Image (spheres, helix red, strand yellow):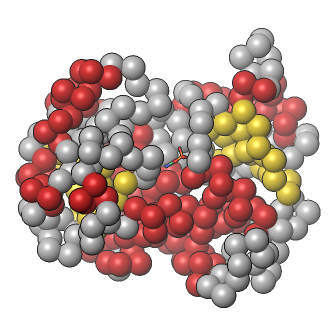
């Protein structure tokens, strides 16, 4: 089943094809209003369900608009509205839903839920974020990076702060597509060893360090994320640990002069990033958010074996 579960499941040519498809479709929409359909409608007759066990703004809006613009039918449902968690197994839910729709995008609290759902489903399943990874986000991030800096394989990316699910998908992106990733994180918030071991096995240029200044040194792109993600509860401890990792003007001075600043959003302004950087010349955060729309189209098409 052609699921979209994690970036490491794809070859470099497959991910490059998705990035090219996203860029081509973005270009082709330049003169269209947002509510207008694309010039071709490859998802006509296809029904796609978006299931959210966690809240969302970008993932929901971008998938809904991507599907509408490609001519498909879409509906969104929260996990709480379904029988999930009220006794019906995840596998049975996947089998049932597979009888109604052609594809499901699932934002699951636990990565295991996503894997269980995908292994029982007879339709493609897309990972819309779990506690472990966020591959649809990072495909859009790579698209954003390449629009300004060219091939990621020639770029130096710095991840600053919590080694969370978005960081994990960045590790996989660099492992498949090339480029270098330096992660500046406190010892206790480094990415899970599974991702670092995978990076080592795949000879990915990924390095983890404690110093944010060292991680950012000469970077072409500096990326951060909220100090407390949706699945975290140790708020005070995280704030204390991550304060020295705030992306501010002093830290950005260590990066290349024309470095980009990225954040998947939502941002907690003046915690992980200052207003000055969010709203300043380095920032491409709203291009990143827009590119979710274009990247989702490429992901959906790949699930249906289309371009
Ligand atoms: N970045 C991201 O996934 O945003 P949402 O949680 O709003 O979908």
- Looking at the image, how many numbered discs can be counted on the residues? 0
- The residue depicted at 84 percent of the width and 36 percent of the height is 97
In the picture, measured across the screen, residue 307 lies left or right of residue 102, that is left
In the picture, measured across the screen, residue 176 lies left or right of residue 159, that is right
Residue 15 appears in the figure: no
Residue 70: image x %, image y %?
77, 69
Where residue 250 sits, quadrant-wise, is bottom left
Quarter of the image with the C terminus is bottom right
In this orientation, which residue lies closer to the viewer: 257 or 198?
257
- The residue depicted at 80 percent of the width and 17 percent of the height is 88
Where residue 232 sits, quadrant-wise, is top left
Residue 35: image x %, image y %?
76, 71
User: Which residue extends farthest top?
Assistant: 87
In the picture, measured across the screen, residue 187 lies left or right of residue 112, that is left
Q: Name above or below for residue 146 compared with residue 184.
A: below
In this orientation, which residue lies closer to the viewer: 20 or 248?
248
Residue 59: image x %, image y %?
60, 50
Q: Name above or below for residue 79 compared with residue 60.
A: above
- The residue depicted at 87 percent of the width and 67 percent of the height is 44
- The residue depicted at 59 percent of the width and 78 percent of the height is 26
Residue 256 appears in the figure: yes
Residue 64: image x %, image y %?
72, 56
């Amino acid at each position: 089943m052609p699921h979209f579960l994690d970036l490491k499941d794809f070859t470099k040519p497959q991910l490059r094809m998705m990035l090219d498809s996203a860029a081509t479709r973005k270009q082709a929409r330049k003169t269209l209003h947002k509510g207008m359909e694309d010039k071709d409608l490859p998802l006509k007759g296809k029904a796609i369900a978006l299931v959210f066990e966690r809240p969302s703004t970008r993932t929901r809006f971008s998938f809904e608009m991507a599907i509408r613009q490609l001519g498909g039918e879409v509906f969104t449902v929260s996990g709480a509205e379904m029988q999930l968690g009220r006794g019906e197994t995840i596998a049975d839910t996947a089998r049932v839903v597979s009888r109604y729709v052609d594809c499901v995008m699932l934002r699951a609290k636990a990565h295991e839920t996503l894997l269980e759902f995908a292994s029982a489903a007879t339709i493609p399943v897309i990972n819309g974020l779990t506690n472990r990874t966020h591959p649809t986000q990072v495909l859009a991030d790579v698209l954003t990076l390449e629009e300004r800096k060219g091939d990621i394989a020639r770029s130096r990316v710095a991840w600053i702060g919590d080694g969370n699910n978005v960081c994990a998908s960045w590790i996989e992106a660099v492992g498949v597509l090339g480029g270098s990733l330096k992660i500046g994180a406190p010892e206790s918030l480094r990415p899970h060893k599974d991702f670092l071991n995978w990076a080592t096995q795949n000879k990915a240029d990924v390095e983890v360090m404690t110093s944010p200044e060292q991680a950012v040194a000469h970077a072409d792109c500096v990326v951060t994320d909220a100090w407390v993600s949706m699945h975290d509860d140790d708020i005070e401890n995280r704030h204390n640990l991550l304060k020295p990792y705030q992306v501010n003007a002093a830290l950005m001075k260590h990066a290349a002069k024309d470095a980009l600043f990225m954040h998947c959003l939502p941002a907690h302004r003046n915690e992980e990033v200052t207003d000055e950087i969010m709203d300043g010349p380095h920032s491409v955060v709203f291009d990143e958010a827009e590119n979710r729309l274009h990247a989702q189209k490429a992901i959906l098409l790949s699930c249906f074996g289309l371009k």
